[in-house]
Amino acid sequence: MIQNTFKLSIVALLLPGMLYAQDVRKLSLPEAVQLGLENSKNLKLSQNRIDRAVAQLKIVKDEKLPSASASFAYNHAEITTSTFDFGGADPLSLPKRSDAFIGTAAVKEVVYGGGKFKLAEESTRLLTEVAKLDADKSAKDVSYAIINTYYALHKISQSQKVIAQNLEAIAGQLKQAQRFFEQGIVTKNDVLRFQLQQANVTLSQMEAENNRKVINYNLDILLGLPEQTTLEIANPDETLNTPQNLNNYLELAMANRQELRSLDIQNRVAANNIKNVKANLLPTVGVGANLYYVNPSGKFIPPANQYIVPMTVGANVAWNIGALWNNKNKVSEARIQQQEVTLTKDLQVDQVKTEINKNYQDYQLALARIKILETSIQQASENDRLLESKYRNNVASAIDRIDAETLLYQSKINLEIAKADAGLAYYTLLNATGKIFQ
């Protein structure tokens, strides 16, 4: 009994830790992007739009098939007049009631419709391609949103590590100051200064933890994970990429940007629309066949020679002559619409070029900032070492010692943030090319 109670106590002690471990998930950047793409509600909506466009394409293809119809009717008549006098001739005797079965069947097909069916199918197919490009753009936007949030969480995590190191160093300095105070080497004011520095850095630690929780929650939402999941992320920028020539990124953008490709397709749709309007000037040709069944005998299966089954075959040619003078303005309107698409693309190309150049310059600046901060850390480390030695020898004041240490750890935080900013700047540049993963 005592042994079982001991086992239950161990389980009770370990249970909170086990539950907590289940809420922690380690994710690399590629894993986070893949998970986000799988769970994105925006992408599911984009896929639904693609399915709708494909369904519309199938509907247009169905409209090219022949149309057919059939009907069968039964008529019953009660005749109140038994004779019908033609005036001078022998009167006609009429039955009291009459029944008849009438059936029809027809098949029709447009042989030539001015090419409208073919143009409609091509335009719908192109619009399906536009829907797929929109889905690609949505996937790219979702990926970038995940990368952006992932780097934000990385910056906070790296800052927290440096802050923890800073607090550890301050704790050591505070113990040293208290020992010096007990020995009469420094004043109580020096001890208070280190305590104040410890309080300030602790507040920074609390603010960083609060920001981490907010960003962690946002990333959980993006990835489709339970909101209470704590994410542990890997360092995404272990090796920063050397930027290529600016023209390389411009060429990639011209070839891959979904907006530009979509406008190219819309231009082809506009060209098809012009052809479709011009097709109004052409005649249409159709053929059809009709089958009739007339059974006035009143019996569902009539006796011989008491029913007729005529069949007709015909063709028709129709031409809207009025289109010769009232269609030209419609053609002009369609051409203006195509010109608008062309101008929109030209404007979009200029915007893409501007965006690529800015992101390229930002990435180069981010790389340069890292080099400068690495040098500043070396200088701050040397300055901190010298002032620590001077403080130990009672040459430097507590204020000078605190300032040197603060400068060192702030430089370390700035470096970690700069590395994260550089990694994000690189993905921002790739995102502007239309292909976020090269």
Image (tube, rainbow, N blue to C red):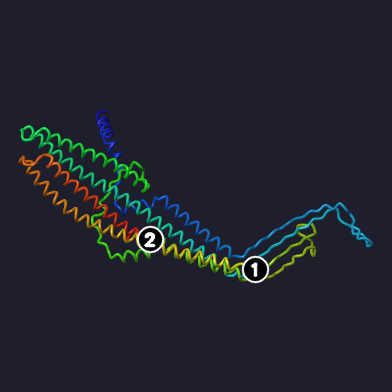
Q: Earlier in the sequence, mark 2 or mark 1?
A: 1
Q: Quadrant of the N terminus?
A: top left
The residue that appears at 31% across and 66% down in the rendered structure is: 248
Camera-side residue: 68 or 46?
Answer: 46
Q: Position of residue 145 (x, y in %)?
A: 35, 52
Query: Marks 2 and 1, how far apart in space?
Result: 45 Å
Residue 22 visible in the current orientation: no
Does 397 appear above or below 268? above
Camera-side residue: 3 or 360?
Answer: 360
The residue that appears at 86% across and 55% down in the rendered structure is: 95
Residue 161 as seen in the image, left or right of residue 145: left
Residue 76 as seen in the image, left or right of residue 275: right
Q: Which residue is mark 1?
A: 322
Q: Position of residue 106 (x, y in %)?
A: 68, 64
The secondary structure type at the circle numbered 2 is: helix
Q: Amino acid at mark 1?
A: Gly
Residue 188 as seen in the image, left or right of residue 336: left
Q: Which residue is mark 2?
A: 351
Camera-side residue: 232 or 76?
Answer: 232
Q: Quadrant of the C terminus?
A: bottom left
The residue that appears at 25% across and 61% down in the rendered structure is: 242
Task: Give the residue furthest to the right.
Answer: 88
